[in-house]
Image (cartoon, grey):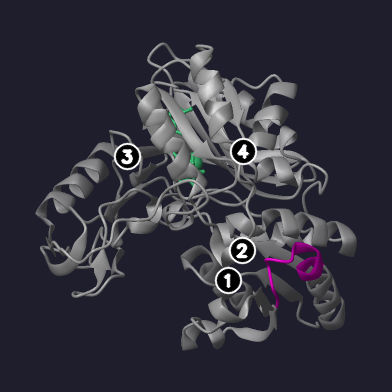
Amino acid sequence: MTPSRVLLLEAAGPESTALAAAAVASGHQVHAATDPTTHATYPPDLKALLTGSLLTDFTRPGQALNDIIGYARRIGANALLTANEYLTELLAHACAALGLPGNDPDRAHAARNKAAMSEAFAAHGIAAPRTRIAGDEDALRRLLAAGKIGFPCVVKPADAAGSAGVTIARTPAEAVTAWRAARAVRGMYGLPLDSRVLVQEYADGTEYSVESVTQDGQAAHLCTTAKTVTAGMHRVETGHSLPAALPLHLEHAVHRQVERAIAAAGIQNGASHTEVIVSPDGRCTVIEIAARLGAGHIGFLLQHALGIDPWTALWDTALGRPADLTPTRRAHAAVRFLTAPGTGRLAAVHGLPQPGPGIPAVHLRRAVGERVEAPRANRGRLGHFIVTSPDAAAAERRADHLLAQVTIQVTPEEAVQPKRVGAGT
Ligand SMILES: Nc1ncnc2c1ncn2[C@@H]1O[C@H](COP(=O)(O)OP(=O)(O)OP(=O)(O)O)[C@@H](O)[C@H]1O
Ligand SMILES: [Mg+2]
């Protein structure tokens, strides 16, 4: 049988690399599309997985789409896929043009851009935070002066990811500072981003995500993931645990909202990651949806806890074959992220767990001497470890105990320049 040829939009990063490796393990020939700068950072073991690469310029989306379609036709691609948040819209358009299984290109913008998402959620009757859009600082000041914004509120860029530029503001002055910080965020590849800023009602409660795989418009929910999130102005995810056991009636209510969000974002063939907040009285609010599997090692947790291979399942979905999503195990898995206590040079890391039974992965991605920052976004993470256990509470206890043993020392640097934030940046 001739091997399938598959094209992965971006192969860098843990989830994308896992997709490349799973495709090779299934006997597919894997090609990657990326930009020259990112391609230069591909490690040799990733390059060894790839049959070929398309180097394109994502900052010119029209040209990038033509490049991807042309390359896919040349290699006779049977499937296209991405794990990269910034490329999901491009993927939907490319799949549609090539007649390959993918998502609705007319709705793909709503899965990426939070302003469009908020409109799509409202049109589909989804329980989501009330959202106002402040295109410029004057618009924000007008909303504040008219008393249209309650506090706390959440200020976030329309078009970013990884919690970058997201602030919980408690006062009008904080909202203005937060607006400028949201405006200053830059996307991956230097992509031109929608510069509008959202001001959202704050949803109080416990945060979860739902990982789903949709085939021909039928969604299967793989699990609910509980999040550990920092408190304060900047909510950075510091851990995920799965599967989270919600009371059945609540799980049904959450799935109903998630299914509406999947439809609103035009997800027909592929993964989705839906973030929800459940209030103390059991109301579910959808914060956002992404047309990809959850990042932050959630796919690896699925493998460890439930024995589901999401990478192979996603290629099968992209190839239009039935995906095997049946759990083969009933355990629990948790990831904890290592973060710096402050900004400066990483001086030392002590007490890191060793991989072994119940600790399948430990990874420190920053070296001593490198400049690190207190986390204001997911990008600030220094590394992670994963814990597994047959018991949910035991997995949590062990993960939190191991994290408490880790000491991260940072030498403050007087020369560290504050991040430039302001109008016009
Ligand atoms: N309306 C809201 N109410 C309460 N908390 C919120 C709200 N919006 C965002 N948050 C908090 O801020 C975090 C980041 O916001 P959001 O998910 O919208 O940004 P993001 O850049 O897409 O993040 P990521 O890519 O990490 O999911 C959320 O995970 C949540 O903790
Ligand atoms: Mg989010």
Residue in the picture at 38% in, 50% down? 377
Q: Amino acid at mark 3?
A: Thr
Mark closer to the chain start, 2 or 3: 3
Give the distance between the C-alpha atoms of the residues marked 3 and 4, in whole angstroms: 23 Å
Residue 59 belongs to the span the image colors magenta: yes
Which mark identifies residue 312? 2
Q: Residues within 10 Å of mark 1 (few under 14, many from 20)?
A: many
Give the distance between the C-alpha atoms of the residues marked 1 and 2, in whole angstroms: 6 Å
Residue identifier under label 4: 114
Mark closer to the chain start, 3 or 4: 4
Residue 18 belongs to the span the image colors magenta: no
The location of residue 208, given as percent across then percent down, is: 44, 34
Residue in the picture at 45% in, 15% down? 150
Magenta residues, start to end? 56-65
Residue identifier under label 3: 228
Q: Is mark 4 within 8 Å of ligand 1?
A: yes
Q: Amino acid at mark 1?
A: Ala
Viewer-closest of 257 and 305: 257
